[in-house]
Amino acid sequence: MGGLVLNSSTLDKYFGILKNLDINSKKKLIIKLTESIQTKTKVTYSIDELYGVWQDSRKADDIIDYIESSRVNKEEIETL
C-alpha cells in the first residue's frame, strides 16, 4: 500500500504550521507518526480456526422443533 509522497517544499510548509504547536501536542504527534511507520505483524490463522461445528446431543429434528417452538408471533400489529 503506497502512501502520500510530499516534496521538500510541501514538508517545509507543514513544518511551518506544526512548529508553533505546544510541547505536549508535538510529543503526541511524534508518537502517532512513529506508530504509523512501525511495521505491524500480520496475524495468521489456521483454516481450522475459521469455522466451527455445531455440537449438540439432540437430533436435528429435535433442534428444529425447539427453534420453531421458541419463535414468537405477535397477534397485534403495531401502527407506525
Image: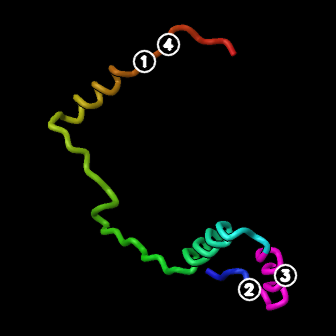
Q: Which residues are magenta?
A: 6-19
Rendering coords of residue 47 (x, y %): 31, 67
Cα separation between marks 3 and 4: 65 Å
Q: Nearer the viewer, mark 3 or mark 4?
A: 3
Residue 26, image x, y percentages: 67, 72
First in sequence, mark 3 or 2: give its number: 2
Colour convention: rainbow
Residue 46, placed above or below residue 73: below
Would you identify the image quadrant in which residue 49 lies?
Answer: bottom left
Alpha-carbon span between mark 2 and mark 1:
58 Å
Name the main secondary structure of what is drawn in magenta.
Answer: helix
Q: Nearer the viewer, residue 61 or 43?
A: 43
Residue for badge 2: 5
Mark 3 neighbour class, 10 Å CA radius: few under 14, some 14 to 19, many 20 or more: few
In the structure shown, which secondary structural element does the residue marked by tag 1 occupy? loop
Q: Dot 2: what SS?
A: loop
Q: Residue furthest bottom?
A: 8
Give the alpha-carbon distance from disc 1 to disc 4, as whole Å.
6 Å
Label at residue 13: 3
Instruction: First in sequence, mark 2 or 1: give its number.
Output: 2
Label disc, if present, on residue 28 of the rendered structure = none
Kindly identify the residue that appears in the image at 82 percent across and 74 percent down: 17
* Residue in the image at 25% along x and 31% along y: 63
Label for residue 72?
1
Kindly identify which residue carries mark 4. 74
The kind of residue on which mark 4 rests is Lys
